[in-house]
Image (spheres, rainbow, N blue to C red):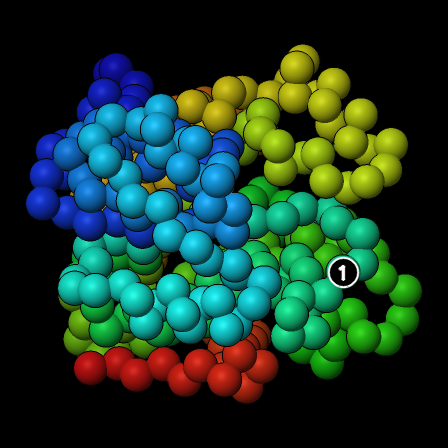
Amino acid sequence: MAKWTASDIPDQTGRTVVITGANSGIGAVTARELARAGAKVIIACRNLAKGEAAAATMPGTPEVRELDLADLSSIRAFAAKLDGPLDILINNAGVMALPLRRTADGFEMQIGTNHLGHFALTGLLLDRITDRVVTVSSGAHRMGRIRLDDLNWETGRYQRWPAYAQSKLANLLFTYELARRLTAAKSPVKALAAHPGYAATNLQSHTESVQDRIMALGNRILAQSADMGALPTLYAAVHDLPSPTYIGPDRLFENRGHPKIVSSNSASRDPETARRLWDLSEQLTGITYTFA
């Protein structure tokens, strides 16, 4: 059987998609391929100039709108300006292994951007979403632990990789809990997740340490392309899948390959942790979800 590729995306004419962080990497590929299939694509990114430059290389007429996931006021402004129904929200943007930094609202930057920012955005847009929410996680979730007593690393020694892993585990806990709540509300909206495997993007170039050079070498030797890394997200966005489903690459260790349904660890599927993280996320962001 032939492997699934972007050429298998069905016609998306008439559908509207918001993709966070779609000015580069797998987000840009995701935007390009959905635009090629006829979707109205909205590139939501912090740097408008980079977003416009990326949009200029894509088919159709993608829109570029400002969104800084590390600033709740920016998230609220973006949501307030978005008119009409939205078929698909793709929570793609992310940061990885940064030195300790804080968002505009005082959150540790990785949990603040990767999880809390997307949690707030999804909550503000949920009443307009008609089809699905796709959140991009990572195989690194398997190394994660949710620090419910100190989510934002305000005590003890900050560790960049455990902080990243926590944020990616949070992405999956959020997806599974969102699916449970949507199902309980008898909503037709689906919650899905995907991970790109090891894909060569600029995500790996912001550690501000010797690790940048090490990962740049890995990108050249070991990683698959951003085009391949985007396939799980695209598959989750357009394929007829139950909620929740997790999609990743099909080859050894899920580092590369074509999309398939994959599993996540038991920590990501713990409903009690998911509920407590959800409650904490509502408290921290001030965004309370309403399910029709």
**Which residue is at a point 74% across and 27% down the rendered structure image?**
215
Residue 206: x, y in percent?
A: 72, 40
**Which residue is at a point 51% across and 20% down the rendered structure image?**
225
Q: Quick one: label 1, few (<14), some, or many (20+) residues within 10 Å? A: few
Q: Amino acid at mark 1?
A: Arg
**Which residue is at a point 29% across and 44% down the rendered structure image?**
63
85 and 83: which is toward the camera = 83
Residue 25: x, y in percent?
A: 50, 32
For label 1, the SS is loop
Please give left or right for residue 289 compared with residue 151 in the image.
Answer: left
Query: For mark 1, what is the residue?
Result: 101
The quadrant of the picture occupied by the C terminus is: bottom left
> Is residue 119 visible in the rendered structure shown here?
no
Q: Judge whether 233 appears above or below 16 on screen.
A: above
Question: In which image quadrant can residue 123 be found?
Answer: bottom left
Residue 35: x, y in percent?
A: 24, 33
Question: In which image quadrant can residue 175 be found?
Answer: bottom left
244 and 38: which is toward the camera = 38
Please give left or right for residue 130 compared with residue 19 in the image.
Answer: left
Please give left or right for residue 118 compared with residue 265 in the image.
Answer: left
User: Residue reaching furthest right?
Assistant: 157
> Is residue 281 visible in the rendered structure shown here?
yes
Q: Judge whether 201 appears above or below 287 on screen.
A: above
Q: Judge whether 213 appears above or below 167 on screen.
A: above
The quadrant of the picture occupied by the N terminus is: top left
